[in-house]
Image (spheres, grey):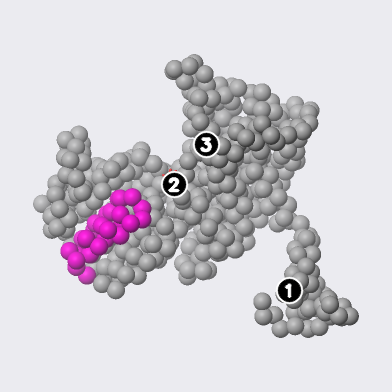
Amino acid sequence: MSAQIGVTGLAVMGANLARNLARNGYTVALHNRSVEKTDALLDKHGDEGDFVRTETLQELVDSLEKPRRVLIMVKAGAPVDSVIDQLEPLLEPGDIVIDAGNSHYEDTRRREAALAKKDLHFVGVGVSGGEEGALLGPSIMPGGSRESYDSLGPMLEKISAKYNGEPCCRWVGTDGAGHFVKMVHNGIEYADMQVIGEAYDVLRTAAGIEPAEQAKIFTDWNTGTLSSFLIEITAEVLAHTDARTGKPFVDVVVDSAGQKGTGRWTVVSALELGSPTSGIAESVFARGLSSQRGQRELAQEILQGHEGSVDLPEDFVEDVRLALYASKLVSYAQGIDMLTAAAGEYGWELKLDEIASLWRAGCIIRAELLDDIMKAYAAEEKPANLLLAPAFAESIAGAVPAWRRVVAAAVQLGIPVPVFSSSLAYYDGLRRKRLPAALTQGLRDLFGAHTYNRVDADGTFHTLWGEDRSEVEAVDTH
Ligand code: 6PG
């Protein structure tokens, strides 16, 4: 029996994707560096579909129908290159190698270009939804050549999550586009979690609402515009009581957030693209600060807060909900802005409505909001920024008074709200008629003759600061 797809790397994500494929009627060849994992999968789940057991990559390749499809699910970085190096001599022109891990999109671009020279397709696929998603239906963001998608797409669409029956899988663009889109998804995931954390902290510290009570609030929020997977599981985590101590679970967990790197990659890439992704950046920095335990302990002793007191408005909980909503919207707007910048830089034809549609189910940032985001970009007139889409311009404007109150209260009480506040600064920065960037330009011209443009004339100018301060027209060489 020849298999329609092979999976190598059978840790949880690989094993669950293989099972998902088999459950959907595909014959799946299995391979793992140590055969024990393959056998364990077959022992436990071999009856879920048709699997072909292989012990070597050669056997895996030999078991596949042509053109071959080999899905790699190993740790991002050097392990992916190592598997590719072993596979490549065993494959034939037209075969497809799929990397479904969280690889960096630049690695994917490099690998795609190298394999294309050998007439092999390399497809970097973003997969979101964690272990459960991989098994039951993830959101899938494939890149690579359009041609490879013709062969691979139907399988991926079949195993993907569905939103109202529509598969959350679509070809997003050439070479590293799939992994880029997944990276931005993760950046938004970081910001989404950080704003939830800020809402929790403000509700607890400013309003004294304990975790169990907050769980009910988050459950309630999950029925409105904030409805999303992350809000739903926040209620679950906040409601959980630690069995050992009887304390709220959230109080026994060390407050240092880990990170595997995709959030950081998003920010590095945003900086390179010149895209102002402040909410995502602040959420990565917030994890970094949380992990500086030594400095934090010393600072608790040394640094004074001079906190003031605040009369909270009667419906402070609603204020916090609106601040959370507005900040979340800004994070999405910034992530999407970054996608636009990357499309220009890398020549990808990213369709923003389609990308938003992929995130409506299966992935970690799945949210009701994404259906509206999809509709905003499906409109004939595409918004230059998500916040400028009429529906969102209106809903965020409605949240602004509450958003300002929450940020002001948090600042007054010494509660750090880096994403609430930076998102508000972004919103104000975007809508401000005059920014102090004019002064920055003046300073740059004074100390470095970096030149400036005028509001009332075309051309590039320089003031002779060290001479008579007259203005000359300049050729902008900077
Ligand atoms: C997903 C997740 C998944 C993982 C990230 C984030 O979409 O299924 O994003 O890929 O949770 O790698 O991990 P860190 O928080 O450890 O960076």
Please state the horizontal and vertical placement of residue 404, each as a whole percent of the image. Answer: 74, 41
User: Which-is-in-front pick, marks 1 and 2?
Assistant: 1
Range of magenta residues: 67-93
The vertical placement of 473 against 178, above or below, is: below
Q: Is residue 82 located in the magenta-colored stretch of the structure? A: yes
Cβ of mark 2 under 8 Å from ligand 1: the answer is yes
Image quarter of the C terminus: bottom right
Chain-order first, disc 1 or disc 2: 2
- Which quadrant of the render holds ligand 1? top left
In the foreground, 293 or 476: 293
The residue shown at (71%, 50%) is 425
Q: Which residue is denoted by mark 1 in the rendering?
A: 448
Alpha-carbon distance for marks 1 and 2? 40 Å
Q: Which residue is denoted by mark 2 in the rendering?
A: 260
Q: Which residue is denoted by mark 3 in the rendering?
A: 256
The vertical placement of 314 against 177, above or below, is: above
Alpha-carbon distance for marks 1 and 3? 42 Å
Please state the horizontal and vertical placement of residue 183, each as a whole percent of the image. Answer: 46, 53
Mark 1 residue type: Gly
The vertical placement of 116 against 10, above or below, is: below
